[in-house]
Image: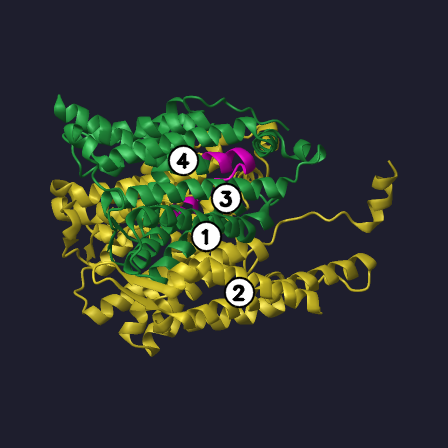
Amino acid sequence: MDYFVELFFSGLTRGSIYALIALGYTMVYGIIGLINFAHGEIYMIGAFTALITSTVLSIFGFPLPAIVILTLLASAIWASAYGFTVEKLAYQPLRNAPRLSPLISAIGMSMFLQNYVLLAQTSDFLPFPALIPDFDFMEPYAGFIGSSDMVILVTTTVVMLLLTWLIKFTRTGKAMRATAQDRKMAMLVGINVDNIISITFVIGSALAAIGGLLIASHIGQINFYIGFIAGIKAFTAAVLGGIGSIPGAVLGSFILGLTESFATGYVSSDYEDVFAFSLLVLILIFRPAGILGKASIEKV
Amino acid sequence: MISFKDIQKGLLVSLWFVFLTFPLMVIKVNPIERVITWRWQNMGWVALGSFCYYLATKIYKARKLARQQQIKLGLIKERVDWGQRLLSERKIYLPVLIVVGLGFLIFPLVLSTYQTNIMVTALMYVVLGLGLNIVVGVAGLLDLGYVAFYAVGAYSYALLNMHYGLGFWTVLPIGGLLAASFGILLGFPVLRLRGDYLAIVTLGFGEIIRLILENWNSFSHGPSGISNIPRPGFLGLHLSLGHSITYMYYLMILMVLFTIFVVNRLQNSRIGRAWFALREDEIACQAMGIDKTRTKLTAFALGATWAGMVGVIFAAKTTFVNPASFTFLESAIILCIVVLGGMGSIIGVIVAALILILMPEYLRAFSDYRMLVFGAVLVIMMVFRPQGIIANVRRTYKIPDAIKPKLSRK
């Protein structure tokens, strides 16, 4: 039973990380209908920026709380800046191009960013400092849930609530929803669609960076390749929940996280990634619109 | 052409890139020894590079705009693309074809075995590029796991040879068929859906195949792979290493010619036109009575067949296969060949494959930056020249001037 509970919580932790990345995919897909392959790379860049910032700050002798806050800020800011720039360079010129063009451009951007980090930094795994201390009040539960799992779960919940508030109740959120529904119509009622798309990329990238920081500090090491697999899995989660739907992405992520956790715990850990991909293929066969997604009919 | 304002904006852009690349390019940390290395010179390079890139795109756009305006006003005629001119004028393409053909024919006789070996690899990528061209270029299906079918071919030769002693020529069609059936198996559920899903599912499939090959030791011998795969025999003669590479080379030349022939015939066939039509507009295509799923599946399976056959040749050439040869990187290179060459353009794909495979071989300094450049190539080609270096010539029917007024009166 203890093993089951432990797997359950580790699945939730995984799920919340996937959720933070999957939200970026789903938001971008909802607005411009593009699978942003470079999103996984933004997450990786967020993790790298966090590593660099936290190491520099700790060498300069900052106290731990300051390091945590500044690192979070820095990684969110730089990841957003990358997301913004990627959109401007690789996707905006292709807004009216055939469907295949932005997809290929996105693949290219993903390869470029991956190798840019590889060349600018290193190909080795780098140890990531534990930014989250072991809390005393978590002591009794240490058997099945660690402090960092707890922090990840709490942070994710807070971020989700903030995002829901932003999309449901602010002017920007309203504009985002309008753009997602019908871009031309949104333009006609005076929404600056280019700005809204940029904002979407910035928010998605910041969420991915938070995910990158949390998971890096949880696992304890990063390299330039982590974005690739995480990106595919988060995308799987987004499709599972119904791409374009924000609650769907969160639900899909938790389902994927739990499935993976139990499958690796009870079956075999060699095929960890195979489970996610097989799940993806199965969903596409039986319910291509996802759990919460609506089947869209293409109109002429 | 460049105003003061452009330079001002260029400076702002380069400032932005300096900020953007600051943590990753300038700072390098070693978290264990707690050392920071500051690389300020990189900052200068980033600033200079982004400034030049900005001005270059600005000039390119301005010139394109000016040209379009002049065409509109009737001052100059629309320039015929040089790639199309090369293809359409017999006086130009015939001598080029003869010289290049002769060059390829005597290549192994003039140059060393080492050079021939590299050329064999390049020719393999030509065939792979042409195969993927059917899928991505002609039918417009983004396949990111093409390497999986390549792996199926390579492993089918390795395993069938090891267990049943089957020879190269027997396995060549079997490998192709096996890859095609994998293609159908994977394509069937996915091709009914929107195109974007195909990209991610094929990407996942490529990874699944690699992971299975790596982990299922009793089947594929795991990461250590299978060695001692025989080279193809020539009428039962025993060939030395040098001779067998030369033999491989001519085999590949034949393979390339065969592929060009098949792909060319396919493109102008009924199904080929259906592929082009599907790429352009799915809904219109279905309205014309084309079975979308079946047509896509044919393209997908045919593409996979070529990958399977090249896989068999790859196993025979290296005499050794292991999962490390079939990573996503390979798929990305092949995709890059198709995109750079021009989607749907046979000659473009051949030229691009030769450039992209031979360049890193001969410019060793370049090989570190290979993937970076490939990624950039994909983006830049899509943004500035989506038709590729040598654009595909589309069959068009031009309405003769004599009957034009009649049509437009209505």
Tell me the number on the disc at residue A109.
Answer: 1
- Element type where label 3 sits in the image: helix
Q: Are marks 4 and 3 in contact (CB under 8 Å)?
A: no
In the image, residue B201 sits, relative to residue B376, either above or below, namely: above
Residues rendered magenta in the picture:
A26-42
Kindly identify the amino acid type of the residue bearing the numbered disc 2. Ser
Chain shaded yellow? B
Q: Dot 3 corresponds to which residue?
A: A202
Q: Position of residue A167 (x, y in %)?
A: 53, 30
Chain of the residue displaying label 3 = A
| Quadrant of the rendering where the C terminus of chain A is positioned | top right
Q: Dot 2 corresponds to which residue?
A: B50
Q: Dot 4 corresponds to which residue?
A: A22
| Residue A35, magenta (yes or no) | yes
Kindly identify the amino acid type of the residue bearing the numbered disc 3. Val
- Element type where label 4 sits in the image: helix
| Quadrant of the rendering where the N terminus of chain A is positioned | top left
The total number of labels drawn is 4
Q: Nearer the viewer, residue B96 or A183?
A: A183
- Element type where label 1 sits in the image: helix
Q: Position of residue B51 (x, y in %)?
A: 56, 67
Chain of the residue displaying label 4 = A
Chain of the residue displaying label 2 = B
